[in-house]
Amino acid sequence: MLVVRPLHTTDLDDLYTMTRSAGKGLTTLPADRELLQRKIDRAADSFSERCKPEAALYLFALEDTDARKMVGISGIEARVGLDEVFYNYRLSLIVNASRELGVHVRTPTLHLSNDMTGTSEICSLLLADDYKGGGNGLLLSRSRFMFLDDFRDLFSEKVFAEMRGVSDPDGQSPLWNALGSKFFDMEYAEADRLSGLGNKSFIAELMPQYPIYLSLLPDSARSVIGKVHENTRPALKMLKAEGFNFNGLVDIFDGGPVVEAFVNTIRTVRDSLNRQVVVSSKPVNLDVPAEQRVMISNRSFSDFRLTTIPMSCVGLNTVSIPREVADELRLESGEMVRLAPLKDGGLSPIHYDEAGTSSDGNARG
């Protein structure tokens, strides 16, 4: 069984192994054991409420309970830019015109921006290679929205994701080579690493404050602005399906796009509902296709746990789960859970009662 839960200190070895295989360019999860341990410690402080809510970092592990190992990670940054300034480039236009000469020129530009300050960020999505496919990436990504839905007061009304931009197998970024390298006396990988560590003051000190004219950049750099790394395309596709859209901002180093959505418009949030648990001794075949599965969370803050069950388990007012699932989610009969379809186009559980007939059950429990 695959279960999403808070990241633990015991996950460090598995997490380090995954980051080593992820390649260069994954800023928030570098293959650095000391840094990863600090992130785990910060996440532990967040779930135990030992830090200010706005400074929290919630990191979730995907655990294979049979193998007893961590196979994926995803996260939510409660607020960005409140401690270290958070930078992006905003794509814009400068128009120059001369009526006498009959000239009207529109020049695309990049402006240094702090527009996302105070906004919640979904981040740090990584899945072990052996577990890709079968809806596991969907589970890891969308589980965050179940947590967001139950604890909205901890997050901003709008959330965003900064997507990994284009780089080659050696970690070289065309945009960095054409732009950033002219102002920073360091390699792209080092600048990106420092940014990931939160050491971002050097950006304001060294980057130009005036607009960057894209027409002065080579084609290789212009062509990657707003584009994602090949490995990031599935993640972007998932977010678009959830209702996220490009907001005109890009990463200052590799030009990767920033996508955003309001929490109440996110598909998983819109399609979720609450049901009361009935723990059953009746055996259930949990191995069903992704489009026939529904996510189920225990709605706990400090011990958030989530997995999937067949949609056939969902009734009009209750959801029947086998004991093995109840144990993994730490649930007992009578407790309330949150449910949402795992896959786009899947049949929403709100349309089915316990007899399998059509129903218009209360979508918000």
Image: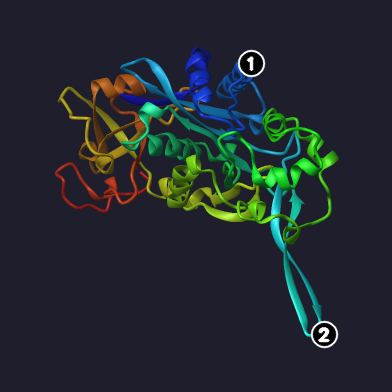
Which of 208 and 355 lies nearest the eye of the viewer? 208
Residue that numbered label 1 is attached to: 34
Q: Residue at x 71, y 61 (%)?
A: 92
Type of amino acid at the residue the image marks with label 1: Glu
Please say if 61 is above or below 155.
Answer: above
Please say if 135 is above or below 241.
Answer: above
Residue that numbered label 2 is attached to: 101
First in residue order: circle 1 vs circle 2: 1
Please say if 219 is above or below 135.
Answer: below
Q: Residue at x 47, y 45 (%)?
A: 233
Please say if 294 is above or below 58.
Answer: below
Residue 258: % across, % down: 60, 48
Residue 19: % across, % down: 53, 24
Point out the frontmost of discs 1 and 2.
Answer: 2
Query: Which quarter of the figure has residue 251?
Result: top right
Residue 349: % across, % down: 27, 45
